[in-house]
Amino acid sequence: MDLLANLGNGFALIVGIPQITAIIAGVILGILAGAMPGLSPSMGVALLVPFTYKMHPSVALILLASIYIAANYGGSITAVTINTPGTPSAVVTSFDGYPLTRKGKPGLALGTSLIASTVGGIIGTIILIFFSIPLAKLAVKLHPAEYFALAMFGLTTVASLGGKNWAKAFVAAMLGLLINTIGIDPISGVSRFTFGFFRLYDGFSLIPALIGLFALSEVFLRLEEHKFARKVAPEAAFKKEVWPSVKEYWKLKFTILRSSIVGTLIGIFPGAGATIAAFLSYDITKRTSKKPETFGTGNPEGVAAAEAANSSSVGGALVPLLTLGIPGSATTAVLIGALMIHDLNPGPLLFKTNPDIVYSLFASLLVANFVMLVLGLWGSRLWVKVTKIPKNVLFPMIMTISIIGSFAVNYSFFDVASCIGFGVLGWILKKYGFPPAPIVLGIVLGKLAEENFRRAVIMGGYSVFFTRPASLIMLIVALLSFSYPLYKTYRERKRENEVASN
């Protein structure tokens, strides 16, 4: 009863012009930050922190949290329309979102993305409200061995991402892991593969890498194929009838619900984040689908799984932040700084000393999702017109956005050069049938896997991975998860050979 009473007070506290204005402004700025390649949710929040110094703490937190939740949806806009993910987690949305656009159904992809993001955000917030404290206690009890096992489970998604070309997907993932080793060793502090070049001490930034691998590589590929005519190809033309119907949304209900729960749970693990949640959710959805072969070719289920997971991970990431003072993602690390600026110490005492701020934040997150739905429905009709821009105008625009976006990460021309380099790498890989997505997966999970593997070994030796039940179970599941698609592919090829021989 106290929880419901506090939540009711939270809704009462956000009924005011400053609070409502903060929610609307935060959602608009968040969508823009997510849609612009280079401006991730964490950067969007960080850029606005200085403007909150003079605000009331609750209004400041509402503004920053609204930006956070909307930025995850914003990344899907450019991922769907021009195959340029605005955020790392939107990479997964592009797997099926962009193929739908090329089939002439951008409205179906954008509509599915919006609804899945909204529902995922609401479910993540509800879980945050009702289960935050027990879930946080569970998350902090996990040993580095369990975090390593989680990373291994995430890496097993390469088996399904590659489909029948699983070997090439595996090679691409290994390439991502190798790229992640460039820079300063996280444990010993020794420089690795830097060749004395100081700019490599921090390794390659993720944002320039994914912009190059997805956006620039696509431009280079189209230019090579001479697909830059002045008129838009018929398959990319916008048709009003392709917007999803209520019936089509209803078909996705179990996918959205499952992905929202998966996204929230993954978000709770500090360091996991929206990108890992989206990859895992997409993989689970593909494995449980009756038509797994349609994923990657324009299946709305793939879009729904990715967007529901990355939006619901926001609620999950806020669980350890608010209850224990531990950041669950890069964005919540920025939010910790914002809380401290306003003399608020995140942790268990925050619920006792400032329940008004905590529960007004919960209420504002729910309202922000509905505001995002309204603004998304209004704006999608405008965003979809990007697909009607002639290619000879669109390609220079993508190049410009990519360069600006990669430069904006660290204000470094080295990142621009990295973006172009990864663009060339992605172009070459696509030409020879190597998918770029596993490279991003390797880069994202490489750090989590390496650091926690070495910490676990230091704390308990190599046997710790098999003596801890949770770690052992997760590693077995990861092995089965990786082996099953390979076995399935082997059986299919064997059957095809038998049919051909007969």
Image (cartoon, helix red, strand yellow):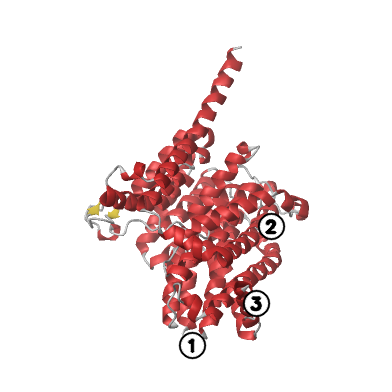
Q: Would you call the spot at circle 1 few (<14 residues within 10 Å), some (14-19), or many (20 or more)?
A: few
Which residue is tagged 3? 8
Task: Give, as a three-letter code, the residue at label 2.
Answer: Gly
Tell me which residue sits at (71%, 54%) in the image. Answer: 238
Which residue is tagged 1? 54
Residue 437 placement (x, y as % from top left): 48, 46
Tell me which residue sits at (62%, 82%) in the image. Answer: 13
Which residue is tagged 2? 111
- Can you say which quadrant of the picture contains the N terminus? bottom right
Q: CA distance from mark 2 to mark 3?
A: 31 Å
Q: Are marks 2 and 3 in contact (CB under 8 Å)?
A: no
The picture quadrant where one finds residue 348 is: bottom left
Residue 44's disc is none
In primary-sequence order, the first of circles 1 and 3 is: 3
Q: Would you call the spot at circle 3 few (<14 residues within 10 Å), some (14-19), or many (20 or more)?
A: some
Tell me which residue sits at (49%, 82%) in the image. Answer: 52
Residue 74 placement (x, y as % from top left): 58, 63
Specify whether residue 61 is in view: yes
Residue 489 placement (x, y as % from top left): 53, 29
Q: What kind of element bears circle 1? A: loop
Q: CA distance from mark 2 to mark 1?
A: 38 Å
Q: Would you call the spot at circle 2 few (<14 residues within 10 Å), some (14-19), or many (20 or more)?
A: many
* Relative horizontal placement of residue 200, taking residue 20 as reference (left or right): left
